[in-house]
Amino acid sequence: VINGLIQNSNFKIELMDSVIITCSSLFDYLSDRVATKLIGAMFELLSAGGTLFIGNVSDTSPDRFLMDFLMEWKLQLRSADDLLRIVPEKIKSLQGVIAEVISEPLGLNLILRIRKPHH
């Protein structure tokens, strides 16, 4: 799926001009380098005014030890700043782009929200 989004594929064609693209439980396993490339590829698939939502477990999660050592989930836990840092510079520099991090009330699951400009 990741290669299908980064490279040209039929899968990519299916998502072209999406109003909303969501991705949860994937970026927790991706390096910053791959995550940045994937954000760039998904952003290109959005229609004008479309929004990208990317979920990631917060680096403040109290379940960090449990997930890492007992369940052997080698997650890339990130802070809000970390999530904003993996947004490609070419996206952040576009006029009208809104990139922000929101979360559920406990702040354990972060959501990177990137809105593409209408123009």
Image: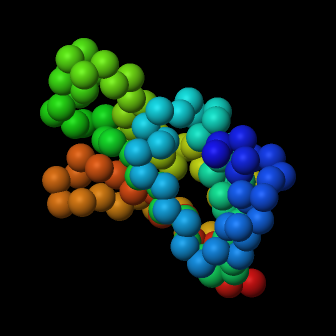
Up/down of 106 relative to 32, above or below: below
Residue drawn at (64%, 35%), measured in percent from left and top? 34
Q: Position of residue 107 (x, y in %)?
A: 23, 51
Up/down of 80 relative to 43, above or below: above
Residue at the top extreme of this rendering? 69
- Say which of 73 and 33 sits in front: 73
Up/down of 109 relative to 22, above or below: above
Residue at the right extreme of this rendering? 8
Can residue 41 be seen by looking at this rendering?
A: yes
Residue at the front extreme of this rendering? 10
- Quadrant holding the N terminus: top right
Colouring convention used in this rendered image of the protein: rainbow
**Tally of numbered tags:** 0
Residue drawn at (68%, 67%), measured in percent from left and top? 15
Q: Position of residue 27 (x, y in %)?
A: 49, 42
Q: Is residue 75 left or right of residue 91?
A: left
Up/down of 57 relative to 40, above or below: above
- Say which of 87 and 40 sits in front: 40
Q: Is residue 118 left or right of residue 69?
A: right
Q: Position of residue 69 (x, y in %)?
A: 25, 15
- Quadrant holding the C terminus: bottom right
Can residue 96 be seen by looking at this rendering?
A: no
- Say which of 4 and 57 sits in front: 4
Q: Position of residue 88 (x, y in %)?
A: 67, 49
Residue drawn at (80%, 53%), measured in percent from left and top? 9
Residue drawn at (77%, 65%), measured in percent from left and top? 13
